[in-house]
């Protein structure tokens, strides 16, 4: 039996029977075929960055850490083919060396591309969809051991773009890229009421836009990024300051206070707001601007809402915090995502606001997250697959118009449930009963 496996934030744990690290597609096919014969469960893990239990299993854990190569960069077609275990930061460097870049990135780049695809990882832009929406092809080993090659015309593409690890093991991904570009990031501090009143205009005020609000404070910081021809690069010193001073010391202090002296949180959040959330301008390579250093360990829940409910959702979150008395010791983040065609993508068929409630382990967190989820569901929200949520399979079916069609594809590609785990058992819609 392998040692206990946990996610990055140490909030999910499992004890797999063993861990496999294949190096080839053929090894994966053989592994899945054998597992089907013996009735063994198989689950792929990436960087273990999800807060949900999506990658947890007491069966066989398959790590793609030894499958991280760039297979082909096609500059004429504007795409790159890579092994699915590649980390985004490694991919970013390989693309930069060729004068290319991904059009969108999430907040951190330590995840694997297969994990990003499986959870619907996104950035913040109403010009661009989430990262999986740029995927134009993949190779997938199904639960029967069959290798399926999916291209732009394949009927499975939109089912697989956010597949939750249920359809099979992704071995290769082909994703669209573009010319490398510079970004100028500016920040603006608004009072809370102004941010709410102008939310829709703010969302469309730049190519990349996001908002941070530190609970128990009255100000919101707006981050805007636009392309620029101005040269520049985020220096190693600035990245060190972001990683060590801001993330580990400043935010780390607030998270530590939340665990030990919750009553000090409002004052500490105010200190962070005055120290860090100030107007500034930074120019650099797109991936260096769009992604941040890994933050201290904490917990996250996040819901994708219809864009026009963004202000109400943030307002309700503030009211929930005030009425419950919970001391929230980390940021609340508002991001925006362009609609896409992924069947199980939280932004499926609608422009979305992604509202994230973040907090370190501290008194009141479970009640706060539960209350937040109820408020978001009332506003038509859909949970982020890689973060904490309690929504049931019945609720999820109502949130996703293509849920039944997707579940049918899961049953076709994995008829024996080789890739099932407690997460999928909980969220996968059961077949509808015929009247």
Image (cartoon, helix red, strand yellow):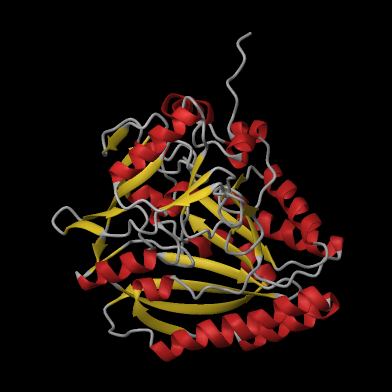
* Visible residue check, residue 406: no
Residue 116: x %, y % from top left: 44, 54
Q: Is residue 213 above or below residue 264?
A: above
Q: Residue furthest bottom?
A: 237
Looking at the rendered image, the quarter that the C terminus falls into is top right
Residue 358: x %, y % from top left: 66, 64
> Does residue 186 appear left or right of residue 226 in this picture?
right
Q: Residue furthest left?
A: 76
Q: Residue furthest front?
A: 1
212 or 39, nearer to the observer: 39
Q: Is residue 45 above or below residue 186?
A: above
1 or 117, nearer to the observer: 1
Residue 13: x %, y % from top left: 64, 55
User: Which residue is painted at 49% across and 85% down in the image?
Assistant: 280
* Visible residue check, residue 223: yes
Q: Quadrant of residue 260?
A: bottom right
């Amino acid at each position: 039996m392998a040692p206990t496996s946990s996610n990055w934030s140490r909030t999910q744990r499992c004890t797999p029977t063993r861990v496999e690290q294949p190096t080839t597609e053929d090894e994966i096919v053989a592994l899945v075929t054998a597992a089907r014969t013996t009735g063994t469960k198989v689950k792929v893990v990436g960087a273990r960055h999800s807060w949900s239990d999506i990658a947890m299993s007491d069966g066989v854990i398959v790590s793609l850490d030894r499958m991280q190569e760039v297979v082909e960069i096609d500059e004429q077609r504007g795409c790159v083919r890579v092994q699915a275990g590649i980390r985004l930061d490694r991919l970013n460097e390989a693309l930069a060396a060729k004068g290319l870049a991904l059009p969108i990135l999430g907040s951190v780049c330590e995840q694997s591309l297969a994990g990003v695809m499986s959870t619907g990882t996104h950035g913040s832009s109403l010009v661009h969809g989430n990262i999986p929406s740029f995927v134009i092809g993949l190779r997938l080993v199904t639960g029967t051991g069959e290798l399926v090659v999916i291209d732009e015309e394949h009927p499975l593409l939109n089912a697989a773009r956010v597949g939750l690890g249920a359809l099979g093991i992704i071995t290769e991904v082909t994703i669209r890229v573009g010319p490398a570009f510079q970004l100028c990031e500016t920040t603006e501090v608004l009072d809370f009421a102004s941010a709410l009143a102008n939310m829709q205009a703010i969302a469309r005020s730049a190519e990349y836009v996001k908002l941070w609000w530190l609970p128990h404070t009255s100000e919101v910081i707006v981050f805007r990024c636009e392309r620029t021809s101005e040269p520049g690069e985020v220096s190693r010193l600035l990245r060190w300051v972001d990683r060590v001073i801001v993330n580990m010391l400043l935010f780390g202090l607030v998270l530590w206070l939340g665990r030990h002296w919750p009553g000090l949180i409002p004052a500490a959040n105010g200190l962070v707001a005055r120290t860090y959330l100030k107007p500034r301008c930074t120019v650099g390579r797109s991936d260096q601007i769009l992604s941040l250093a890994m933050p201290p360990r904490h917990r996250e829940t996040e819901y994708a809402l219809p864009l026009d409910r963004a202000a109400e959702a943030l307002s309700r979150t503030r009211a929930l915090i005030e009425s419950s008395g919970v001391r929230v010791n980390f940021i609340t983040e508002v991001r925006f995502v362009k609609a896409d065609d992924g069947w199980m993508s939280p932004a499926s068929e609608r422009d979305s606001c992604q509202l994230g409630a973040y907090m370190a382990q501290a008194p009141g967190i479970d009640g706060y997250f539960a209350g937040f989820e109820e408020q978001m569901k009332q506003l038509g929200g859909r949970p982020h697959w890689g973060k904490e949520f309690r929504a049931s399979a019945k609720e999820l079916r109502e949130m996703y118009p293509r849920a039944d069609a997707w579940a049918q594809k899961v049953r076709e590609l994995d008829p024996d449930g080789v890739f099932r785990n407690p997460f999928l058992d909980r969220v996968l819609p059961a077949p509808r009963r015929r009247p």
